[in-house]
Image (spheres, helix red, strand yellow):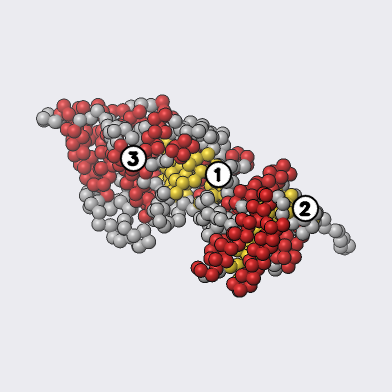
Amino acid sequence: MNNKKSEIQISVNTALQASITPIGIDFEMNRLRLGENYCCIFAITDYPSECDYGWLSKLTNIPGTIVSINSEPIDNGEAVNEISKKIRMYRGQAASTKDPRERQRCQKAADDQEKIMAKMDQNGEVMGKWNTTIMVLSRDKEDYNSRCDRVKNVASILGCKIRVLSNLQREGYQQISPTYPQIKRIQETSSRYFPVSTFVGGFPFSSGGFNDGKGFYLGKNSSGGLILLDLWKRGSSRTNSNITIVGGSGSGKSTAIKHIIASEYARGTKIIVIDPESEYKDMCYNPLFEGNWIDVAGGKGGLINPLQIRPVPPDTDDENAEPQENDSIGDLAIHLKTLQTFFRLYIPSMDDRLRALLDQALVELYHKFGISWDTDVSGYSANQFPTLTDLYNLIAEKAKLKDNNTVYYEDLKTYLEGAANGADHRLWNGYTTINPTSGFIVLDTKSLIQMSGTVLAAQYFNVLSWCWEQITHDRKERIMLVADECWTMIDPRCPQSLEFLKNAEKRARKYEGSIIVGTQSTNDFLDPEVKFYGQSVLDLPTFKLLFSMDGKSLKETTELFNLNDAQSEYISSGQRGTALMKVGNQAVIVRFELSEERLEMFGRGGGR
């Protein structure tokens, strides 16, 4: 038998080849080409005589630049000799020139050098030898020229002298590169004596934006600098990871929310979205997220039984401590408070007498199912709890009894007819069927828009209470809840719904939770009937993103968040895709500059 040998054709991995191939560098007289980038290296050849705090940060934070600063400690005696030479030189030039303007400049330069020398003698000022080089780079030639002009203009405004390193671009690139030592020719060209305190007081490495050192890219500040945000960072005024997002229709609010949750999902955070507008459906179905889209407005697999008791989570004042044995008032007692709010939202016209009878009926019903005040329901399954049919039948039985409360039980039976047997039974009557398996969950409530406001408010609250159970289930798992268009659950006749959300915001930090409250307007939250809780819901979050708005909402937002005139004017300017971000007493403009690929990820539903 003959063994035939054949050559195997190995395909070339062009992507890998491109990633490891060294980029080309071409040096010209006044610029260089670094791969596809146009670059130019400048050097600061003189520094200003009078400086404000932070002066140097204006030069070192220009977008599209790389700045290298080298310092060399020197003996003050050497510095004095050098400054003396400069004073003599400037005085001589002032005496010999016939140009009045040049004479004035020389005299001022000599006076400035004398001031420095006086500081050294009288105050012990320490001098240093400084070398600052700046590389501008951009792939677009027009943008490259614009950035070069900006660098020169900023340097001129600061009082610095700047020059292109002509015929020294190669040496300038080596000077900036961390793989080379300092280049002698560059040092001779641009090293200058300057007071150490003045240079350090320029805060060359500070930034006007936010940079937490880790986290995700949020956007760019007004100067084009990157904002790197870590929502889970603690310290100073950053006491929680919650966000308030306010913005009118078309302002970019939905895009910002989608960008934030996509970034946090990539970091391993579990995402739960309450979606009243079906804006997150496409995003949920994107293969990058592999989410669970659940119709909680009567759809299959989306039923949340309001009578199912949620276990009381173990609590502690120290979020780093291990939870202790639960000594609360009990799962049943706490859930009855939740049910009181639920029924207030669903049936606001029910009077106090009927509510008291309903509470008694609920307690009796739970006892029939073996659930008392001391029962721990953490091990119970969904079908071990009563349903609204059970509650309706119990009340119907009581209505048949001939006593003083018969007429009232008849009224209760009538009120519950819709939830047990009528149009609303698909929402609440049955065992809980919702059982998501993904780390990206969208709870869609859009179909509720066709129903009454009371049904919408009650179901939003019901869904919100289920979400809170998910957040508190595992205090070590990071979960972000997005309560978009949160105003839909607000009813001035039932402020308890906002009280529930306020308490959730206060406690979420203990369970590694983050709550995003999104709304188009602050009006509903600041209604006099609910303002006590509504104001807290908007103000408690550490982070506030305020998009374009006007009218009454602008006025209320300005007062609520204590905005100054400039901040208020900015959010009234109507710029789409930009927001004012407040973190404690700090404020920064955020421009949400996202790629087309990123926006495509978000889908068609809003947010584009």
The residue depicted at 39 percent of the width and 44 percent of the height is 467
Q: In the rendered image, is residue 407 in sight?
A: yes
Residue 345's x, y, as percent? 30, 33
The residue depicted at 67 percent of the width and 53 percent of the height is 103
The amino acid pointed to by label 1 is Ser
Q: Which mark is residue 222?
A: 1
Q: In the rendered image, is residue 285 in sight?
A: no
Q: Nearer the viewer, mark 2 or mark 1?
A: 2
Q: Nearer the viewer, mark 2 or mark 3?
A: 2
Question: In 3D space, how far apart are the residues under numbered discs 3 and 1 (Cα atoms)?
Answer: 29 Å
Q: Which mark is residue 548?
A: none
Label 2 environment density (alpha carbons within 10 Å; few <14, some 14–19, many ≥20): some
The amino acid pointed to by label 2 is Asn
Q: Is residue 243 above or below residue 74?
A: above
Q: Quickly name the residue at label 2.
A: 30
Q: Secondary structure at mark 3?
A: helix
Q: Is residue 373 left or right of residue 558?
A: left
Q: Secondary structure at mark 2?
A: loop
The residue depicted at 17 percent of the width and 29 percent of the height is 408
Mark closer to the chain start, 3 or 1 = 1
Looking at the rendered image, the quarter that the N terminus falls into is: bottom right
Which is nearer the eye, 458 or 300? 458
The amino acid pointed to by label 3 is Gln
Label 1 environment density (alpha carbons within 10 Å; few <14, some 14–19, many ≥20): some
Q: Quickly name the residue at label 3.
A: 535
Which is nearer the eye, 450 or 267? 267
The residue depicted at 72 percent of the width and 57 percent of the height is 96
